[in-house]
Image (spheres, rainbow, N blue to C red):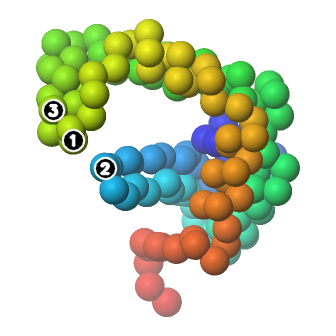
């Protein structure tokens, strides 16, 4: 999603300095968000452009190319995130803390590979619904 947002909102529309999506997942809840660094006078247009991209994903899903790139990015991030012994220990502790069964790296990669375009479309339709979105703006008042 970040690449799509970056291409549209920064490169095509030139409405921001930076834009990216992020996620934080927990055992019973989580958050998926978008950060946009922009000028105050561009903030409404940038927010509208973000909502439009989310709407397009919710309605149309991802192209097969976008899905393949996303899977590669997720798998690459996973591999890089386990380079230090501390991060490996954190991953192992997470299984114990959350009562999850241990999954090998190969099993996690297989799960990523098993995600279908329909899976993405279902989740996007549910969670990118404008009625579920909250907007938080930080910047100069007035």
Q: Which residue is drawn at 44% across and 78% down?
A: 140
Q: Residue 42: tell me if it is visible.
A: no
The secondary element bearing badge 1 is classed as helix
Task: Using residue 91 as the reference point, say whether residue 120 is left or right of it.
Answer: right
The secondary element bearing badge 3 is classed as helix
Give me the C-alpha separation between circle 1 and circle 2.
7 Å
The x, y position of residue 68, in whole percent, is 71, 22
- Quarter assignment of residue 126: bottom right
Q: Which of 51 and 13 is in front in this view?
A: 51
Q: Residue at x 30, y 16 (%)?
A: 82
Locate the N terminus by quadrant.
Answer: top right
The x, y position of residue 121, in whole percent, is 73, 47
Give me the C-alpha separation between circle 3 and circle 2.
12 Å
Vertical relation: 137 (above or below) 32: below
Residue 27: mark in rendering: 2
Q: Residues within 10 Å of mark 2 (few under 14, many from 20)?
A: few
Which of the two discs, 1 and 2, labels the residue nearer the N terminus? 2
Check if mark 1's residue and mark 2's residue have beta carbons within 8 Å.
yes
Please give the residue where the numbered disc 3 appears in the rendered image: 96
Vertical relation: 92 (above or below) 3: above
Please give the residue where the numbered disc 1 appears in the rendered image: 98
Check if mark 3's residue and mark 1's residue have beta carbons within 8 Å.
yes
Check if mark 3's residue and mark 2's residue have beta carbons within 8 Å.
no
Q: Residue at x 22, y 31 (%)?
A: 95
Q: Residues within 10 Å of mark 1 (few under 14, many from 20)?
A: few
């Amino acid at each position: 999603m970040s690449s799509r947002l970056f291409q549209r909102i920064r490169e095509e529309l030139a409405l921001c300095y930076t834009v990216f999506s992020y996620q934080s997942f927990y055992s019973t809840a989580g958050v998926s968000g978008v950060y946009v660094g922009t000028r105050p006078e561009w903030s409404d247009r940038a927010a509208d452009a973000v909502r439009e991209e989310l709407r397009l994903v919710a309605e149309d899903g991802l192209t097969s190319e976008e899905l393949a790139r996303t899977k590669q990015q997720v798998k690459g991030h996973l591999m890089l995130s386990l380079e230090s012994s501390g991060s490996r220990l954190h991953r192992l502790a997470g299984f114990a803390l959350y009562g999850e069964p241990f999954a090998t790296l190969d099993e996690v990669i297989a799960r990523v590979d098993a995600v279908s375009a329909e899976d993405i479309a279902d989740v996007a339709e549910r969670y990118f619904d404008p009625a579920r979105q909250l907007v938080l703006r930080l910047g100069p008042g007035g």
